[in-house]
Every structure is written in C-alpha cells, then in structure tokens.
Image (spheres, rainbow, N blue to C red):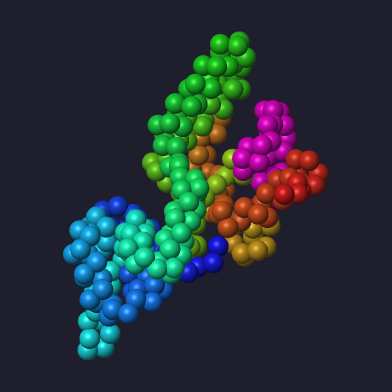
C-alpha cells in the first residue's frame, strides 16, 4: 500500500494510538484555507477534544514556535470526509485501509510470568504421575528447573575478574538443546553435554579471547557454576548443538 500520508505510533491522553500529523493531512487535501485556521476551525466545528481525538506538540523553528496536531485515525477520517472532495474521499479510504492493517496485526502476548512457568512445571509433574510415568530422573529434572526459576535473580551470575558484565538474556547450553526440540535421555545427556560444553567453550575462547561467563545453577539438586552465553551467540551455538546431536546442522 502506497503511503499517502505518514502514520506513526503515538500517545493520545494515556493510550497508545496510531496518529497522523494534521499538517500532512491539510497538504494532501490541498485545502486553500491557511493550515492554522483550517485545523482550529475543524476542531471547534466538530467538537474534537485534545486528549481524546488528538494531542499537540510545541515545535521550535528558530524564533517561531508552532503547534503540531497529531490526530487519531478516526479524527483523520472525519477531517477527510468533511472536505467533500475527491482528495478527501481518497484520504478517507486510505485511513480505513491503514486501520485494517493495524487490526490484522497480532496483539503481542506478554511472556509467561515466573509463577505461570512454575505452575506449568507442577502440572507437567502431576500429568506424568497420573500416567504412572514419573520416574526419578523426571523428578530430579523438574526439581532443578523449578529451583532455577524460583531462584532467578537470587543466584546471580558470576562475572570473572577483568571481564565485561554478563550480556543480556543469557542462556545455558542444556537449555538451548531443549529449545531446539531435542529430548535426550539422562544417559544421552551425561554422554553428550560434557563434550559439547567443552567444544562450545573452546569456540567461544577462539572468538573472543576469553572464557565465557559463569552463573550459579541447580544441577542434579546441587548449586554449580555453569557456563552461560549471550543470545548474540545463539546462531553458531545452535549449529554446534545440531552437529553434536544429529551429525549435521538442521536447515531452517
């Protein structure tokens, strides 16, 4: 869809809204009345309210201060409609199309809270128990995951002397294996993870000339220091995980 009038994200009152600059609308409609008179008359005539239909921004342009009117899409449609011109009709249809694009976009879902994740672990444990499939290794794994969730922020990352602070959104190799969909048995993990951990650590050292950061984590019921990596390294680590597990990287 061609951009006839720029649309931007803004805030009207306290609500996030899609807005358009009334000056851009005025220019597109090719209104002969001077802009400042046109917008103030339209506001008075049709009862538009600041904080509901539009917001104002003071803009300093050298010695002159001007007021920008950022209007909601609803107000923009009305401004276009009341002109009763072909340009007004075109602008109104454009704003309707913009609304449809916004409505078609999925609403971002907040990430699950720590409480939600702990509840999921409990439900998973109960489900396995109801089927008679809750083995000791499952109990230990679920307990480790629950402790790591419950103590998140309490077991703080350990930054080695002389290194930079730990990157944002760190992850552990074992978590990355699970995130890629590999369901390993306890025996497979015991065989794979030590070797994979050493390989990833060696590659990290070659790339950055330093050892990876470490963080405290529950493993087999005990607190241990485990290497932790940044999401910036996820792509090459994923490739190493895939090679270690299946012998070759999985193509996207």
Main SS of the magenta part reads: helix
Image: 243 above or below 71: above
Q: Position of residue 123 (x, y in %)?
A: 49, 21
Specify whether 199 is left or right of 57. right
Q: Residue furthest right?
A: 247
Q: Is residue 187 above or below residue 85?
A: above
Is residue 25 on the magenta stretch?
Answer: no
Q: Is residue 186 left or right of residue 124?
A: right
In percent of the image, x 56 and y 53: which residue is there?
231
Instruction: Look at the image and tell me whether residue 195 can be seen.
Output: yes
- Relative to residue 241, is residue 12 drawn left or right? left
Q: Position of residue 170 (x, y in %)?
A: 52, 50
Residue positioned most to the bottom? 63
Query: Which of 25 and 147 lies nearest the eye of the viewer?
Result: 25
* Residue found at x 39% / y 72%: 29
Number of labelled discs? 0
Question: In the image shown, does 71 or 149 lie closer to the viewer?
Answer: 71
Q: Residue at x 20, y 58 (%)?
A: 47
Q: Residue at x 43, y 42 (%)?
A: 110
Q: Is residue 6 visible?
A: no
State left or right for residue 93 relative to residue 205: left
Q: Quadrant of the N terminus?
A: bottom right
Which residues are drawn in magenta? Answer: 176-201
Tell me residue 66's x, y (percent): 24, 79
196 is within the stretch colored magenta: yes
């Amino acid at each position: 869809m061609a951009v006839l009038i720029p649309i931007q994200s803004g805030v009207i009152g306290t609500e996030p809204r899609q807005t358009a600059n009334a000056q851009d609308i005025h220019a597109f409609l090719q209104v002969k009345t001077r802009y400042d008179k046109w917008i103030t008359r339209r506001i008075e005539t049709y009862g538009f309210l600041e904080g509901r239909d539009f917001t104002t921004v003071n803009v300093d342009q050298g010695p002159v201060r001007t007021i920008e009117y950022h209007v909601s899409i609803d107000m923009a449609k009305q401004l276009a409609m009341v002109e009763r011109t072909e340009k007004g009709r075109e602008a109104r249809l454009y704003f309707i199309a913009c609304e449809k694009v916004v409505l078609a976009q999925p609403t971002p879902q907040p990430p699950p809270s720590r409480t939600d994740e702990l509840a999921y672990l409990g439900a998973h444990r109960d489900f396995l128990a109801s089927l008679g499939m809750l083995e000791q290794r499952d109990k230990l794994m679920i307990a480790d995951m629950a402790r790591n969730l419950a103590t998140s922020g309490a077991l703080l990352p350990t930054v080695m002397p002389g290194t930079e602070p730990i990157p944002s959104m760190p992850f552990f190799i074992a978590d990355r294996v699970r995130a890629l969909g590999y369901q390993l048995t306890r025996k497979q993990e015991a065989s794979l993870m030590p070797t994979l951990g050493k390989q990833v650590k060696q590659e990290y050292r070659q790339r950055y000339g330093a050892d990876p950061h470490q963080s405290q984590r529950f493993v087999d019921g005990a607190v241990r220091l485990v290497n932790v990596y940044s999401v910036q390294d996820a792509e090459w680590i994923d490739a190493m995980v895939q090679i270690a597990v299946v012998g070759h990287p999985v193509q996207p």
